[in-house]
Image: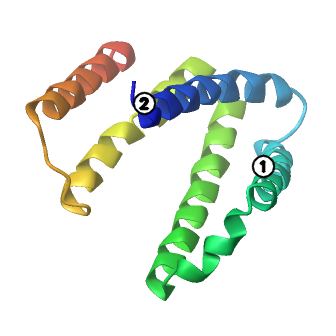
């Protein structure tokens, strides 16, 4: 198994834990406070990882354009999490997670249009299956 596949599987596993643990933690507080707590923990852990792994030495390799896209990515992440936590607070985790994961389809589309990644038949079939599963689970 390629290392990126293992990392992606670990990412999916931890992402699955996020929604359920967040719903439990949101019992008596707003999604905004929960997001603040979560983000604080993430900041501390990411800073620790960056310092411990000496990854900060790579910062001088970034161009202004790359800095801009990383800043934009951070802002998009914040907005995604803000709306995610508000949705989890108000709705069923299973429904929120399902809708949130439809972002895979947006990512696929952008990877073709913006990054020029190839559209293989496997990706097309996989995307169609995701759409089909989404429709089966959301239509009443």
Residue 92 seen anywhere in this rendered image of the structure:
no
Q: Would residue 120 be found to the left or right of residue 57 on screen? A: left
Q: Residue at x 58, y 55 (%)?
A: 77
Residue 35 seen anywhere in this rendered image of the structure:
yes
Distance between mark 1 and mark 2 Cα atoms: 23 Å
Element carrying mark 2: helix
On screen, residue 133 above or below 69: above
* Disc 1 target residue: 42
Q: Would residue 52 be found to the left or right of residue 97 on screen? A: right
Q: Which of the labelled discs sits on residue 12, or is there none?
A: none
Q: Residue at x 26, y 27 (%)?
A: 131
x and y, in percent, of residue 129 in the image: 23, 21
Element carrying mark 1: helix
Give whichever of discs 1 and 2 has the lower sequence position.
Answer: 2
Circle 1 or circle 2, nearest the eye = 2
Q: Residue furthest right?
A: 28
Q: Which of the labelled discs sits on residue 5, or is there none?
A: 2
């Amino acid at each position: 198994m390629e290392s990126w596949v293992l990392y992606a599987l670990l990412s999916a596993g931890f992402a699955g834990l996020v929604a359920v643990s967040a719903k439990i933690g949101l019992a008596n507080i707003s999604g905004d406070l929960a997001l603040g707590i979560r983000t604080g923990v993430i900041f501390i852990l990411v800073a620790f990882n960056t310092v411990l792994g000496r990854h900060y030495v790579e910062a001088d390799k970034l161009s202004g354009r790359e800095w801009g896209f990383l800043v934009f990515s951070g802002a998009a992440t914040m907005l995604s999490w803000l709306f995610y936590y508000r949705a989890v607070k108000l709705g069923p985790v299973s429904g929120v997670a399902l809708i949130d994961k439809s972002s895979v389809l947006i990512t696929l589309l952008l990877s073709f249009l913006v990054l020029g990644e190839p559209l293989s038949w496997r990706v097309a079939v996989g995307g169609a299956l995701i759409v089909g599963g989404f429709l089966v689970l959301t239509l009443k």
